[in-house]
């Protein structure tokens, strides 16, 4: 509970000297080869100087499968299946820095184990609207929570001699027209909402690389934007690492050459024609662009390689993929990522007295790993919830399964061309309405009837529904935003009917972004929220349902009742093609709800436990810069609690903003002092300490005259 110490690998004089020496030896052709993709996921090396190519891979949930050098066709041998980690939204809902670090360490080790130099993660964009197709890849609506967890992840990744690539810089909060949409956004809003995670990633955690975004920011493309890349990232924040374009994010040779961008990547195999390839070489030869502009880029790439021990036969970490430790890491994260939203004395179930269970819902037995866009994972395995329940209960209980509804498409991956096609059609458009034809409606009616009639059978000890979203291309998926926040595939009808015949049906939502639960949230007696929680996710969920694990996840995003409660839609603009003005300003997520007294279905920070916690004795220690309180586990089970500290705003400020948090484990009856260190204690300002959402609250005031 003391302040976190970040280890950052600074550039030494020796590295600088060596990079300069190598730079002198390189020909123009060789330098050009190093600053653009020469394979879909790698640059060109310089064999005669033993400079290897820079090998990259997605992404946030594990290392992506191996592709042919010049296309998105998988090599598809049996050696590139990997550990499938929980997505960043799941990591965020653990509110556990240690787990974020473990997640990063695992990801870095897997990446190095697969021979990668840069892992294209983490994604730290702010969840501005529940409709964004890539929300599952991001942590939270809150910049502080995102920063804290992303820094841990980056530290973990980079311990393995692999570079993190924090993405997508910046304000990449929608997929609609993602290649060209102009995000119009105020400087203060950037500074306080959209920049902090990137700033922390480079300044605190020392991320070696940053990925420029596809979208424009205030009129200029993210990959050659002066305001964001030069004025902010390099000049204000002193970033000395490498800036990599998003795949196809470069639009102009001159602009790219004169910008701070170092490496151009794309989805096409026409490598020589990339903007920073032949076209740039010709301009340099004809004297239109001075060679020095690319020298700076190559210098930074060489420094990166030195930091990663890639040159001069340096001793380098070899990583390890598919180890049991890595799988154990997945399980630990998944266990803490599940959020108990409602529990009226229903959970946990007793496994010993369970003889017959009915599980309903497509997501109960749907593998989610191999979808979602560039975050797709060729997982070594993935336990679904159904598998988790059967594994936990063993052979003495009967677990029946009904599909209940269908999305009509099992994972629709393996359109090998989707990534390059997504650039051709302008980088994604608003989701096309799925063809809900009569045949499909009939099929769903039949599935519903089958599930309802099974649920009516009085012999089941428990009925568990697992639904939500998936990675289909109109759901939680790169390249498209969702049409609305309704629960799709007629699940509302199914859940309503289920609750009529079995009011004790447990409802589990598995999704990567908020969906409206208005049609059943009041009626259900137990409600759980899970993100795409990795290869061990189904096991973790079963352990929570049957009480082997006490849930401790808290929402890292607001679960709205409807879209009107979300500021991006109520105040701002979202999902437009040309220009999206962020009129919602600072009022993103709970900042908006608090300011306008809007009560969402479940607030940011909310999450229940099977035990109870009491908070006592709030205390401000201005000298050491922390605020503390005593937390007591007054219930009958051991459990973890996340204590949250919010800074109260003054006049025109957001009502409250997250300023610190700490997660503690308390055995039943135990109590502990929990100290929270905000970035700095502000004199004369008020803070609140709270547990789950708004339920436990203290207000404390910091003295006026403190030495900060
Ligand atoms: C995505 C990036 C990803 C890259 C490489 C792009 O489509 O926006 O997040 O890292 O592809 O696959």
Image (cartoon, rainbow, N blue to C red):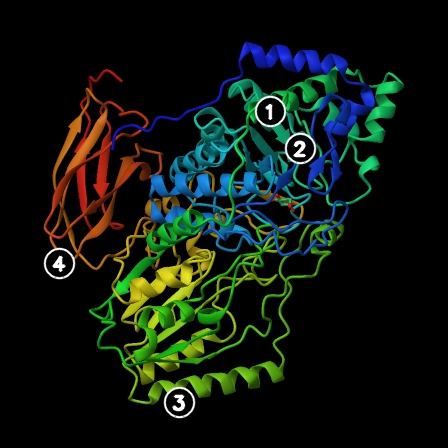
Does the residue at mark 1 contact the one at mark 2 (Cβ under 8 Å)? yes
Q: Nearer the viewer, mark 3 or mark 4?
A: 4
Quarter of the view holding residue 212: top right
Residue pointed to by mark 4: 636
User: With 448 as the anchor, is 239 left or right in this view?
Assistant: right
Ligand 1: quadrant of the figure: top right
Quadrant position of the C terminus in the picture: top left
Which residue is located at x 46 percent, y 43 percent?
A: 106
Residue 637 shown left or right of residue 146 in the figure: left
Mark 2 residue crowding within 10 angstroms, few (<14) / some (14–19) / many (20+)? many
Q: Which residue is mark 3?
A: 453
Near mark 1 (Cα within 10 A), the count class, few <14, some 14-19 or many ≥20, is: many
Name the residue tied to disc 1: 304
**Which mark is first along the chain, 1 or 4?**
1
Q: CA gap, disc 4 to disc 1?
A: 52 Å
Residue 7, percent from left and from top? 41, 24
Please state, as top left, top right, bottom left or bottom right, where the N terminus lies in the image.
top left
Contact, mark 4 vs mark 1 (Cβ under 8 Å)? no
Q: Position of residue 254 (x, y in %)?
A: 78, 26
User: Rounded to the nearest whole Å, what is the CA distance between mark 3 and mark 4?
Assistant: 37 Å
Element type at mark 4: loop
Q: Which mark is residue 17?
A: none
The residue beneath circle 2 is 54
Q: Is residue 275 left or right of residue 388?
A: right
């Amino acid at each position: 509970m003391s302040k976190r110490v970040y280890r950052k690998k600074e550039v030494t004089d020796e590295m600088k000297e060596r990079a300069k020496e190598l730079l002198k030896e390189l020909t123009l052709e060789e330098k050009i080869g190093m600053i653009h993709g020469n394979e879909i996921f790698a640059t060109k090396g310089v064999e005669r100087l033993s400079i290897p190519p820079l090998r990259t891979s997605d992404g946030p949930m594990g290392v992506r499968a191996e592709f042919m050098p010049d296309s998105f066709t998988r090599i598809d041998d049996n050696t590139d299946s990997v550990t499938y980690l929980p997505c960043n939204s799941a990591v965020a809902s653990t509110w556990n820095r240690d787990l974020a670090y473990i997640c990063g360490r695992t990801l870095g080790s897997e990446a190095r184990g697969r021979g990668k130099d840069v892992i294209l993660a983490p994604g730290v964009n702010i969840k501005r609207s529940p409709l964004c197709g890539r929300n599952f890849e991001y942590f939270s609506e809150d910049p502080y929570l995102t920063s804290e967890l992303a820094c841990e992840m980056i530290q973990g990744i980079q311990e393995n001699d692999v570079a993190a690539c924090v993405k997508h810089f910046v304000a990449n909060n929608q997929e609609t027209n993602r290649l060209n949409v102009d995000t119009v956004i105020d400087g203060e809003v950037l500074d306080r909402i959209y920049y902090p995670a990137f700033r922390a990633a480079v300044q605190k955690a020392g991320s070696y690389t940053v990925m420029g975004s596809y979208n424009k920011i205030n009129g200029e493309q993210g990959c050659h934007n002066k305001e964001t890349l030069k004025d902010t990232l390099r000049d204000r924040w002193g970033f000395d690492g490498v800036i990599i374009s998003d795949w196809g994010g470069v639009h102009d040779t001159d602009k790219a050459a004169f910008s701070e961008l170092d490496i151009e990547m794309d989805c096409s195999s026409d490598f020589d024609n990339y903007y920073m390839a032949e076209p740039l070489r010709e301009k340099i030869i004809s004297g239109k662009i001075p060679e020095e502009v690319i020298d700076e880029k190559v210098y930074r790439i060489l420094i990166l390689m030195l930091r990663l021990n890639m040159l001069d036969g340096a001793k380098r970490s070899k990583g390890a993929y598919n180890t049991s430790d890595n799988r154990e890491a997945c399980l630990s994260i998944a266990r803490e990522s599940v959020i108990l939203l409602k529990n009226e004395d229903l959970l946990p179930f007793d496994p010993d007295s369970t003889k017959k269970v009915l599980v309903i819902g497509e997501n109960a037995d749907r593998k989610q790993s191999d979808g979602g866009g560039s975050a797709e994972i060729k997982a070594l395995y993935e336990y679904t919830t159904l598998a988790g329940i059967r594994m936990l209960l063993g052979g003495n209980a009967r677990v029946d399964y009904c599909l209940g509804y269908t999305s009509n498409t099992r994972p629709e991956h393996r359109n090998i061309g989707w990534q390059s096609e997504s650039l051709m059609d302008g980088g994604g458009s608003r989701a096309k309405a799925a063809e809900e034809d009569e045949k499909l409606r009939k099929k769903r009616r039949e599935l519903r009837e089958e599930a309802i009639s099974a649920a009516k059978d009085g012999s089941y000890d428990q009925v568990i529904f697992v639904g939500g979203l998936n990675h289909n291309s109109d759901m939680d998926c790169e390249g498209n935003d969702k049409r609305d926040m309704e629960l799709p595939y007629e699940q509302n009808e199914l859940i309503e009917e289920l609750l009529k015949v079995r009011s004790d049906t447990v409802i589990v939502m598995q999704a990567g972004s908020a969906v409206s639960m208005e049609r059943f949230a009041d009626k259900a007696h137990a409600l759980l929220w899970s993100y795409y929680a990795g290869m061990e996710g189904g096991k973790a969920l079963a352990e929570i349902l049957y009480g082997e694990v006490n849930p401790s996840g808290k929402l890292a995003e607001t679960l709205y009742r409807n879209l009107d409660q979300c500021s991006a839609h109520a105040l701002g603009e979202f999902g437009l093609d040309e220009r999206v003005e962020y009129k919602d300003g600072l009022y993103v997520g709970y900042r908006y709800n608090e300011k306008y007294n809007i009560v969402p279905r479940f607030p940011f920070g909310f999450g229940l436990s099977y035990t109870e916690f009491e908070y006592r004795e709030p205390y401000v220690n201005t000298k050491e810069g922390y605020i503390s309180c005593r937390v007591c586990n007054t219930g009958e089970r051991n459990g973890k609690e996340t204590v949250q500290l919010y800074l109260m705003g003054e006049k025109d400020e957001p009502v409250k903003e997250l300023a610190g948090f700490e997660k503690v484990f308390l055995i039943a009856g135990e109590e502990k002092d929990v100290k929270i260190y905000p970035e700095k204690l502000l004199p004369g300002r008020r803070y609140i300490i709270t547990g789950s959402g708004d339920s436990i609250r203290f207000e404390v005031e910091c003295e006026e005259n403190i030495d900060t």
